[in-house]
Image: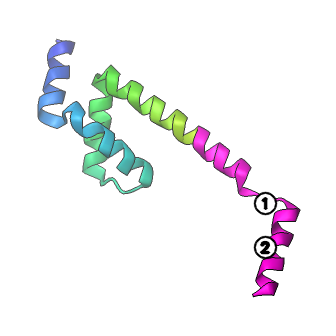
Amino acid sequence: MKALFGKLIHLLIMPCSRVPLLIEQRNAGKLPLIARMRLNAHLLVCKWCAAYVEKVERIDKLLTKKYEEEKSFEDTEIQSFKDNIKKK
């Protein structure tokens, strides 16, 4: 019964091929409510897509952390930038 339900979700609600794009749209905050509901229904029954979501979220967190670490500038870089502006 569960296998049949999973196949129905894949056929009627959303195929796996649409999931990656919708995940990116959801992360960007641009996914409408109905599409979000369909995506969540699909993720409840599809272990492969659920695993994909976990990987995407892990990569996103790592990249965000790395970006925030590199976001600050050294004092020498700031001074060099100011000097270059003064020269122009």
Label drawn at residue 81: 2
- The residue that appears at 18% across and 28% down in the rendered structure is 9
Magenta portion: prevailing SS class: helix
Relative to residue 19, is residue 81 drawn left or right?
right
Disc 2 residue type (three-letter): Phe
Res. 58 image quadrant = top right
Residue at the image position 61 percent from the left and 46 percent from the top: 64
Which is more toward the observer, 64 or 35? 64
Question: Magenta stretch containing residue 15, yes or no?
Answer: no
Q: Measuring from the top left, give residue 3's x and y in whole percent.
A: 19, 13
Measuring 71% from the left and 56% from the top, which residue is drawn there? Answer: 71
Is the residue under label 1 in contact with that under label 2 (CB below 8 Å)? yes
Residue 13: x and y, percent? 17, 36
What residue is pinned by disc 1? 73
Residue farthest along the front direction in this orientation: 87
**Distance between the Cα atoms at labels 2 and 1?**
11 Å
Describe residue 58's horizontal placement relative to residue 88 as left or right: left
Q: What stretch is highlighted in magenta?
A: 62-88
Q: Tell me the element at label 2.
A: helix
Q: Quadrant of the C terminus?
A: bottom right
Query: Above or below — where is 20 with respect to 45?
Result: below
Q: Quadrant of the N terminus?
A: top left
Q: How crowded is mark 1: few (under 14 residues within 10 Å), some or many (20 or more)?
A: few
Of tags 2 and 1, which is closer to the observer? 2
- Assign a secondary structure to mark 1: loop
Please determine whether, in this image, residue 88 is positioned above or below residue 2.
below
Q: Which callout, 2 or 1, points at the residue further toward the start of the chain?
A: 1
Q: What residue type is labelled 1?
A: Phe
Q: Can you give x and y, in whole percent of width and height, for residue 62 in the image?
A: 60, 38
Instruction: Locate residue 29, reporting x and y percent.
Output: 42, 55
Q: Which quadrant of the structure image shows residue 78?
A: bottom right
